[in-house]
């Protein structure tokens, strides 16, 4: 437990770890579905301080990582068109498509621009009326209100040279898909705090009830995560399966009503491919018919663009928690952050990149429960 | 990329039918859409901001603590985008500065 001294509140962290360890009558397996939480868990050595009381599986909580190859290829196609200014959040630019990434398209003369807010992309459309501006609308529920508002405003202001390539995904259907799979090992979930800040947690209640799994809405700081784990373990030990809220300082049960309203007016639930996982029914958001004029997939002919994921990349097994990143043969050999095979090695929130940055010297044998650690970063 | 960053609302105004404002993130200022916190927000409020939109309001202690925690966790990607992309307010054309934004979202140390 030497790393606990580095935490903001080391005494509280130490107390929580002791409680988790003494509470656990057996090893439990939990999954976090938030790239920010994965980052914290790996960086702060939370896996190690918990010993064999809890195994954390890193779920598909990184939107960059689950954006399907097909959508990346469509983005690359659009970005290469001379009449298009392609706009995106920064972390999509290095995600490998079938042949290249957005950075390479830009190097070859494509107009690819990073924006901070989708409203910036809309502004760009207004400033360049002779160009088509396409925004790559990716993300989980946290990002959906922003992207929905850009489309809403495009219609309100009559900006017709703006469209969005949508690859939005939602968390609860992914949790259900994981629980439905025959080799599922997950016994409880930490739900993502900022996703629930927008959506609340009503959607999680039927999942907890139906599959008898505790779900704890959790923040992303080390002490938040330890507390979330403790709350989930306590439920498991007591035979309860409820939705609880560790992150009460930001999350309300019904989330952010105003944000949810706009999202539901602009988007509807659609089947969506998840990179490495496959199609999950009703797990994504697509534009409603009223907004078809701002849908890049309907505006440009993209249906012919399909893709097959490289077999060497085991991102799907990582995202489903079947293997830890270091158990993939490509990890650190043919797949590194400089030359990624799959998206989880690209984003700082991807499990593979987090292991590369903070835990790459672990061996595959260590990947099970309670391993000793030799961290990439020396710690005092 | 689902982590919001806390900042303080220092200015509020309407623009094209939307409640907008300027938010200060530890010295970096950026235009932010306040539509989703419009009922409660006022100048001086602390908001959690994600991709240019305030998604909730928090108290000052929570905002400052969260900001420091994000810094320690190398999870201020969004702030890096903001700095890379520049133009604190109004957002204006994004085009001038993007060329230098190498891997802005990749916060890996």
Image: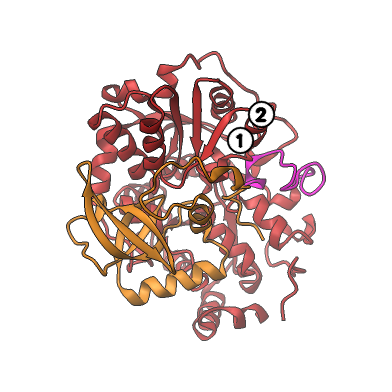
The colour one sees for chain A in the rendered image is: red
Q: B82 left or right of B107?
A: left
Quadrant where the N terminus of chain A lies? bottom right
Observer-nearest residue: A102 or A73?
A: A102
Give how far across and how far down residue A35 sits, in percent: 54, 53
Assess whether residue A301 is covered by the magenta stretch.
no
Q: B81 left or right of B65?
A: right
Q: A84 left or right of A356?
A: left
Observer-nearest residue: B69 or A93?
A: A93
Task: Please tell me whether residue A164 is drawn above or below residue A218 in the rendered image.
Answer: above
- Which chain is rendered orange in the image? B
Q: Secondary structure at mark 1?
A: loop
- Reading the image, the residue beneath label 1 is A276
The chain letter for the residue carrying disc 1 is A
Task: Specify few, some or many for label 2: CA neighbours under 10 Å numbering under 14, 14-19, or 20 or more.
Answer: some
Residue A266, numbered label:
none
Instruction: Report whether residue A57 is seen.
Output: yes
- Reading the image, the residue beneath label 2 is A309
Q: Earlier in the sequence, mark 2 or mark 1?
A: 1
Q: How is the image coloured?
A: by chain
Residue found 69% across the figure and 39% down from its top: A314
The reply to whether callout 2 and callout 1 are in contact (CB within 8 Å) is: yes
The chain letter for the residue carrying disc 2 is A
Image: magenta residue range: A328-346
Observer-nearest residue: A283 or A304?
A: A304
Type of secondary structure dominating the magenta stretch: loop
Task: Specify few, some or many for label 1: CA neighbours under 10 Å numbering under 14, 14-19, or 20 or more.
Answer: many
């Amino acid at each position: 437990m030497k790393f606990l001294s580095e935490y903001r509140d080391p005494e509280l962290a130490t107390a929580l770890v002791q409680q988790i360890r003494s509470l656990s009558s057996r090893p439990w397996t939990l999954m976090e579905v938030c790239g920010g939480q994965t980052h914290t868990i790996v960086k702060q050595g939370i896996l190690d301080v918990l010993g064999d009381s809890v195994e954390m599986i890193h779920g598909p909580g990184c939107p960059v990582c689950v954006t399907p190859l097909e959508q990346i290829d469509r983005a690359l196609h659009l970005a290469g068109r001379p009449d298009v200014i392609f706009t995106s959040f920064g972390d999509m630019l290095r995600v490998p498509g079938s042949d290249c990434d957005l950075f390479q398209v830009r190097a070859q003369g494509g107009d690819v621009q990073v924006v901070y807010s989708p409203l910036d992309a809309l502004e760009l459309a207004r400033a360049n009326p002779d160009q088509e501006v396409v925004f790559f609308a990716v993300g989980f529920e946290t990002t959906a209100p922003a992207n929905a508002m850009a489309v809403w405003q495009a219609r309100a202001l009559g900006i017709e040279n703006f469209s969005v390539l949508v690859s939005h995904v939602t968390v609860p259907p992914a949790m259900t898909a994981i629980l439905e799979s025959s080799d599922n090992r997950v016994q409880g979930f930490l739900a993502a705090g900022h996703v629930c800040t927008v959506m609340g947690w009503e959607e999680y209640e039927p999942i907890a009830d139906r599959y008898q799994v505790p779900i704890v809405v959790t923040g992303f700081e080390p002490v938040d995560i330890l507390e979330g784990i403790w709350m989930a373990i306590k439920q498991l030990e007591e035979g309860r399966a409820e939705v609880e809220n560790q992150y009460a300082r930001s999350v309300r049960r019904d989330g952010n009503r105003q944000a949810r309203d706009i999202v539901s007016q602009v988007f509807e639930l659609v089947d969506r491919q998840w990179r490495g996982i496959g199609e999950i029914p009703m797990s994504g958001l697509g534009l409603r018919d009223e907004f078809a004029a701002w849908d890049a997939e309907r505006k440009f002919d993209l249906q012919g663009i399909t893709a097959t994921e490289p077999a060497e990349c085991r991102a799907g097994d990582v995202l489903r928690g079947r293997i830890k990143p270091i158990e993939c043969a490509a990890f650190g050999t043919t797949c590194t952050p400089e030359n990624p095979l799959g998206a989880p090695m690209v984003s700082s929130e991807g499990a593979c990149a987090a292991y590369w940055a903070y835990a790459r010297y672990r061996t595959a044998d260590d990947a099970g429960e309670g391993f000793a650690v030799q961290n990439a970063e020396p710690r005092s | 990329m689902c982590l919001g960053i806390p900042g303080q609302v220092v200015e509020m105004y309407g623009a094209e039918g939307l409640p907008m404002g300027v938010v200060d993130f530890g010295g970096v200022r950026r235009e932010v859409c306040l539509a989703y916190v419009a009922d409660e927000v006022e100048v001086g409020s602390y908001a959690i901001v994600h991709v240019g939109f305030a998604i909730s309001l928090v108290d000052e202690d929570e905002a400052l603590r969260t900001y420091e925690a994000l810094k320690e966790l190398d999870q201020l990607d969004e702030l890096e985008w903001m700095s890379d992309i520049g133009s604190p307010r109004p957002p204006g054309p994004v085009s001038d500065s993007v060329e230098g934004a190498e891997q802005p979202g990749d916060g890996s140390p």
